[in-house]
Amino acid sequence: MGNVGIIGAGPAGIAAARYLISEGFEPVLFEATGAIGGQWSGNPEISGIWPGLRTNTSRVLTAFSDMPLGPGVVHPPNQELREYLERYADHFGVTKRVRLNTPVLEVRQSDTGWIIEHAGGEQHVERVLIAAGRFHHPQIPDVTGLDSFAGSEGFDSTYNYNDPEQFRDKRVLIAGCGVSALEIASDLAMLGAACVVVTHRRQRYVLPKYAQGVASDHRIFTRYGVFANESLPLEEVGRQLKEIVVEAGGTPGQYGAPDADEEFFKASVTLSQYYLPLVGEGRIHVRPWIDRVDGETVRFTDGSEASFDAILFGTGFEIDLPMLSDAIRSTIDLDEQHMDLYRHTFHPNLPGLAFLGMWDQSGGYLVPIELQARWVAYAWSGAIPAPTQAELVDGIAAYRAQRGQSQKTRMNLVALEFARAAGVEPDLARHPELARALLFGPLAPSSFRIDGHDPLPDAAERFVADAAMYGAITTETFSPRELVYLGQLAEARDDDTLRAIVTAAQA
């Protein structure tokens, strides 16, 4: 099938290589550092992982489809993920194809394919996959007087946080309301900081990692949620998501944090197990956004002031792909937050080039990354039809119309997008006994090996076990609320399959 150069040996690069090999390609991976795993390698050059970090996603959703993570705690420690990726790469013959300590200087198009220029020379390849990672270049917002900050520990990004002992007995300000900001605030509040204050522009709803013994990502990132997003009014989608979040963990105001906007999508949602309880205990304090900094003193927009020894910004990331040639950057109109790509992957004027794992989302990445890798490998091998030129052009136009809006999506939305593109979305009509799990259960990787190209013979049985593992779906019987939602959805979509499922459940 030809040779493929993969830039990066993190989860996306490893998954891409695994499926390209199975489709007959000869991939080689160029990794700038001395280890595979990307963020999960723990290498401070490319990783924002701190020693005590555990995954935000459950064990079921933190694995690829043909190698489960295995038994263990619900949210595994980061070291286990590193070992898992190493084991996966070894098992599927990827490790021997990785060139470590080989940073890529430039990727550019040639008359016959692509040229990858690196410190040791150049390599000509027929195709290139950019899997260099989306979260390596932290974004620090403009704050008046920030450069004057005189706290003993200075200011930095949460990306560089790696030692809670540095902040023992210190007054720490955490800026941001994303997962890393709230997890690090919780970490510091429980590990000896003298004072922890969180500042943000708006209060989000906060979903605990698990509630009532059920991993929250098994409840909120569902296939039903994708159908609802496609077919129901936005207000109703937000109401249903808010219902799940508030039932799991209450509202921020109940803990003494600011109230979140009544409209779910205006407020947005983040994830943290301990943050709100620590606010309720008075071990974390919440302030509005920063107005200005003067020495050790931070003034907030409500006029209050406080002195700090450190400020950590958990305020997002910018896209940083310095290896792309000027011609590629111009073609995809690359800036700090945007790339013109069809389904985050292809561009009509760059045949033989694909991007993996370069979108921003809430929820775990391994499931959609594997689906995207399968789509690319299957489309390039001819196992499934590749997108047409017209589809690519129309997709770019649709993306450009959304530039300037929030670029964050949700794990279930992008996972189903890739599953449909790869032709591996499970067919509800063929599997009525799996209907409840497929609709209201987790988007476990096993569910995407039931139908389509490259199925696994035990995928259905594995999926039933995955859906039941943390109590999300333990029977085939729909709850009364699920049936109400499903009936509403069936009418909105005019979907006879969903109608039949509701009718059978009510019989």
Image (tube, helix red, strand yellow):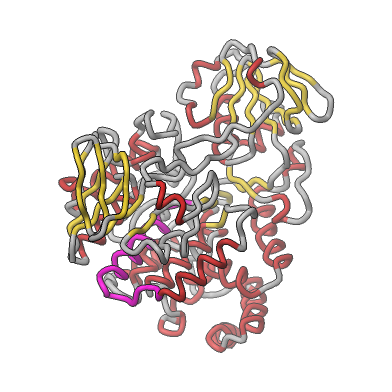
Q: In this view, does 125 lie to the left or right of 65?
A: left
The residue located at (28%, 37%) in the rendering is 103
Residue 67 showing in the rendered view: no
Main SS, magenta residues: helix
Residue 285 at x, y percent in the picture: 71, 28
Asked whether 2 or 216 is in front, the reply is 2
User: Is 254 inside the magenta-drawn segment?
Assistant: no
**At 44% across and 44% down in the image, what residue appears?**
75
User: Could you tell me which residue is drawn at 71 percent across and 71 percent down?
Assistant: 233
Quadrant in the rendering for residue 79 = top left
Question: How far from the left and from the top, in percent, is residue 183?
Answer: 56, 35
As rendered, which of 120 and 4 lies closer to the eye? 120
Q: Position of residue 245 (x, y in %)?
A: 65, 53
Can you tell which quarter of the image residue 485 is in?
bottom right
**Is residue 365 inside the magenta stretch?**
yes
Q: Does 129 sit left or right of 222 as displayed?
A: left
Give above or below for 151 relative to 461: above
Q: Magenta segment, which residues?
A: 364-388
- Look at the image and tell me in which quarter the C terminus lies: bottom right
- In this rendering, does residue 126 appear at all? yes
